[in-house]
Image: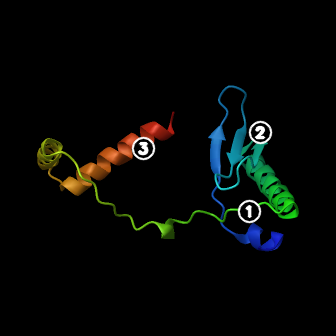
């Protein structure tokens, strides 16, 4: 198990949410369940989140809880294989040709657009 200082140096990802109803911001750490900070400004929210991260990690170490290390993009190759029906393959290929781009680029466009819609919900 790492020390508190070692855990604090790891690049844990922060997710920011703006509270449009009450104002302010919330910052969470996806790899540290329940760890979050709030603030009236983005800067305050991040500062409070870093304080919460310190306290969360200290309590987890003291309790002997298994602490996940940050999920790093190095763990992902950027490639995956996908089997699709022939009719969908043809449709995607035709749409890509109309746009003048490769089918890979067209599929990336569609995935990115859908991910942007999904993450805004």
**Which disc is residue 13 wearing?**
none
Foreground mark, 3 or 1? 1
Quadrant, the N terminus: bottom right
Give the image location of residue 33, x and y in percent. 70, 49
Which residue is depicted at the point 82% across and 63% down? 64
6, 82: nearer the viewer: 82
Which residue is depicted at the point 43% across and 37% down? 117
Q: List the residue tagged with mark 2.
A: 40
The answer for how far apart the CA atoms under marks 3 and 1 are is: 31 Å
* Secondary structure type for disc 1: loop
- Crowding at dot 1, Cα within 10 Å, few <14 / some 14-19 / many 20+, comes out as few
Q: Tag 3 or tag 2, which sits nearer the N-term?
A: 2
Foreground mark, 2 or 3? 3
Q: Are marks 2 and 3 in contact (CB under 8 Å)?
A: no
90, 23: nearer the viewer: 90
Give the image location of residue 51, x and y in percent. 83, 55
Which residue is depicted at the point 73% across and 71% down? 9
Q: List the residue tagged with mark 1.
A: 66
Q: List the residue tagged with mark 3.
A: 115
């Amino acid at each position: 198990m790492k020390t508190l200082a070692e855990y604090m140096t790891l690049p844990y990802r922060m997710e920011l949410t703006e509270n449009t109803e009450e104002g302010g911001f919330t910052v969470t750490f996806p790899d540290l369940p329940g760890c979050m900070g709030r603030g009236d400004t983005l800067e305050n929210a991040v500062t409070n989140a870093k304080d919460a991260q310190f306290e969360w990690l200290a309590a987890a170490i003291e309790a002997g809880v298994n602490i996940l290390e940050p999920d790093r993009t190095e763990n992902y190759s950027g490639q995956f294989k996908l089997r699709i029906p022939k009719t969908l393959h043809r449709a995607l290929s035709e749409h890509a040709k109309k746009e003048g781009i490769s089918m890979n680029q067209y599929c990336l466009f569609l995935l990115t657009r859908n991910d942007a819609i999904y993450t805004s919900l």
